[in-house]
Image (cartoon, helix red, strand yellow):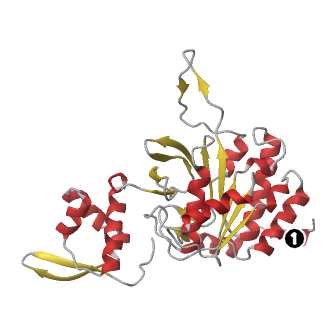
Amino acid sequence: MRVDNIGQVLTGQPLIEAMSAIKNKRKVIAEGFLYEQTILMIAADPGTGKSTVSTQVAVELSAGLPIFGIYKVPKPVKVLYVQTERSLMELIERLEIIHKIMPIVKENLYITSEYQMFNLLNFEHVKVLIECILRDCPGVEVIFIDPIYPMVSGGLSKDEPASAFTKGMNLVQKATGAILWYNHHTVKPSYSPDGAKMEKQDPFYGSQWLKAHVTGSYYMKEQGEGVSLIKKKDNYNLMPHQIDLEYNPETELCTIPFDKMPALDKVKHYMTMRKIDQKEFTFKDIQAQTHLCTRTLRECMASPNVISRLISINTNHNKRLYKISQDEPKIT
């Protein structure tokens, strides 16, 4: 390591400029869900569907499609999906099923199982990993690691390997500028004396180094015909508190049932449909589709992300007609 490899500290005018620049919002990757310079972890029991969900998100991001049909992706992004256990064939089979329903944008989606050989306890491996990412996927914007524990010999329950992993991945993020998405396991279940499974509020597995490292995390648990992502950490207050997903075994895709959407998301979904068909509509038209009470709907329509997209045409018989702007609004 050389001193000229280390950036200088911020002070004086550069510090003031950095403070001014930070006032700008983080770049949106998926509106209301994923933002630049973040690290997201999804923890779930084995077999719950972490890989199914993350593969779908990777495909939607790379194609510029709304995540789970709701969270708008302003533009397609370059995605690297790193499978760290089992054969790559498993991921390819999953992609083949998804491809029957939605497009696979081959120019934006990169997949590999070659990185399974890296051990981030070895700093030389960290450097080679970064070189491989820059070689294989230049300009990558989101990196999925599914799952994370094989990247560290000895697992992530102890502080030393967890600290090495977090330091290595911090360097990866610094070198690439990419969002990091981790799939991770939960602790082994506990059972009461009568054999009933004991539910834990946050069954996080691993050292506190790992928990401190991520900027956001969800616990994914089975619920009815699908799964729920329950927020456990959100440093920047950017993510939904809970995402309920309905799983379709035929397509292997997850969607958010309309009746489970937050009120604002229902309005945004309605507006997306009207942008596509370019139909005019009234307040009552929105209300009939969303089933929101008048007060809630008024509050939603006053939201900057809604009002910036609405164009008021005229008032006809005391009914104001709207249409949706075809221009992309500024995301706030």
Q: Is residue 159 above or below residue 116?
A: above
Percent x, y of residue 38: 62, 61
Tell me if residue 11 can be seen: no
Q: Is residue 206 above or below residue 195?
A: below
Tell me if residue 143 can be seen: yes
Percent x, y of residue 80: 69, 67
Snapshot quadrant of residue 188: top right
In front of the other: 231 or 246: 246
Q: Residue furthest right?
A: 2
In front of the other: 56 or 203: 56
Q: In this view, does 66 lie above or below 88?
A: below
Residue under label 1, please give it.
5
**Total numbered badges shown on the rendered structure:** 1
Percent x, y of residue 212: 67, 47
**Is 181 left or right of 330, judged from the image as shown?**
right
Q: Say which quadrant the C terminus sits in.
A: bottom left
What residue lies at 80% left-to-right and 75% top-to-bottom?
135
Q: Say which quadrant the N terminus sits in.
A: bottom right
Snapshot quadrant of residue 202: top right
Snapshot quadrant of residue 136: bottom right
**Is 166 left or right of 68, judged from the image as shown?**
right
Percent x, y of residue 279: 25, 80
What residue lies at 82% left-to-right and 45% top-to-bottom?
161
Q: Disc 1 residue type?
A: Asn
Label 1 neighbour load within 10 Å: few <14, some 14-19, many 20+: few
**Is 123 left or right of 156, judged from the image as shown?**
right
- Secondary structure, mark 1, is helix
What residue lies at 19% left-to-right and 68% top-to-bottom?
285
